[in-house]
Amino acid sequence: MSLLTFKGGVHPLYHKDLTESKGIKEFSSLPKEIIVPLQQHTGAPCNPLVEKGNEVLAGQKIGDSDAFISAPVHSSFSGKVTAVEPRVIFSGISVLSVVITPSEEQKKMSIETPADLKDISPDTIRKIVREAGIVGLGGAAFPTYVKLTPPKDKPIDSVIINGCECEPYLTCDHRNMLEYTADLILGMKIIMKAVEAKRGFFAIESNKMDAVRKVEEKLMEENGIAGKKRAESPVQIALLETKYPQGSEKHLIKAILNREIPSGGLPSDVGALVQNIGTTIAIARAIRDGAPLIERVITVTGTGISEPSNLRVKIGTLLGDVINECGGLKGDIGKVILGGPMTGFAQYKLNVPIVKGISGILVLPYTQVVPETIMHKPCIRCGRCVEACPMQLLPNMLGSYARVEMWSKVDSYHLFDCIECGCCAYVCPAKIPLVQLFRVAKGEILMKRKREAAALKNGK
């Protein structure tokens, strides 16, 4: 089986050995408090459905919105609502949140699902997925039912389940593939049925051959596949080169289907749909069991954590409580990151909640962190960022114009095609914070566009 890949990218040290062989553990403690933000997804924030003093059950919907691009949120514990107020989340912004004190006795609510899954319709699948509050668990947190509702003039013929997990340190998707293979394959079938796709691919990097074998064995056992030649099956395994950011949906589509998403376009523009491993399993459990998305598997890792683990955590659990569940911090800590080292967010306090899109907690000792007092140097025009950029952009030019706030020039270099993977900053010998510059530039350009649109609307 030949390895598929794309042009560009980098090969960082992966450090997955800390947790890749450790099975998924349950979070055993009862937190004193949880914080459930009412916006854990791309799109419109939810409106609260509860108020201070209400008693709630685990799985109860506590926030929803009428907007098309949104996703409801649910309480992950039974308990009492002690506040509905803004709280700071992992990105540093304040979001209206429901604060709950869990009770000793835990009771669950579930979503109504059909008794027979064989005859379930695509519309019913989308309805249940939305009601379950499922979003992309790879980080983008885009509402999944929206992805399962492609435009009628853009039919989906191929579904790709993203099992690459190319971000260093993280292993939660790897463990999900090994431990919940049956749920994963059921989720694939449900997604293919929802969008009426004729073929599906499990995209797995070559450093996870145990997952490749496990998925392959399970596919052989499935009804309708056993006894057939695997090459004739509508569901295949795509083996990809171990490279970052191999798990980017644009690059998966290019590597597997040899289709290129146009600038500003979406996977549906080329007849493809990409879903994360955790998202696919969550879909299976929502449809089969009526389970809303109130928990997820995360990797807690790094040499600054006492017991690196893959842990099933309830949404809303505080970062500090998760760290304590894994034995606490160890040594002189330099940085705590929610997510991976390439795209994660460094934290300045430990009382932020775990939300749907968080796939890991990385704790690094001071010796592995570049001190903030060390300033970056001028660009030496070496071109390493250009060579590494998987989107074939010119990060050096984007960075130069962003630093002097020439937003129109930045925009002209296709800034919004940047996926913020961090490859450019990783290879930059001058240590220029390119991704941070690009994020600021995107915000400024979007604000400028809104002002111009408002002025045009008002006739100015």
Image: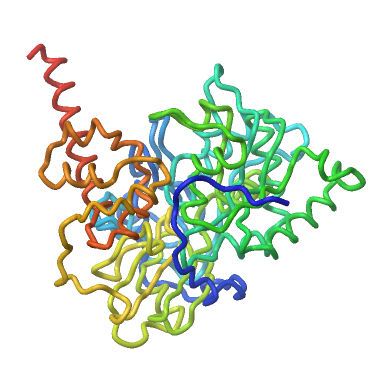
* Quadrant in which residue 148 is drawn: top right
Which sits in the foreground, 128 or 82? 128
Does the rendering let one see residue 85? no
Q: Is 18 above or below relative to 391?
A: below
Q: Is 361 above or below relative to 152?
A: below
- Relative image position of residue 170 (x, y in whole percent): 49, 65
Furthest-left residue in this view: 460
Furthest-top residue in this view: 459
In the image, is 311 to the left or to the right of 158? left
- Relative image position of residue 404 (x, y in whole percent): 10, 44
| Residue at point 89%, 43% (across, down) | 228
Furthest-bottom residue in this view: 331
Q: Is 454 above or below relative to 365?
A: above
In the picture, the quarter occupied by the C terminus is top left
| Residue at point 85%, 44% (across, down) | 225
Which sits in the foreground, 231 or 197? 231
In the image, is 404 to the left or to the right of 319? left
- Relative image position of residue 9 (x, y in whole percent): 44, 52
Query: How does the figure colour the protein chain or chains?
Result: rainbow
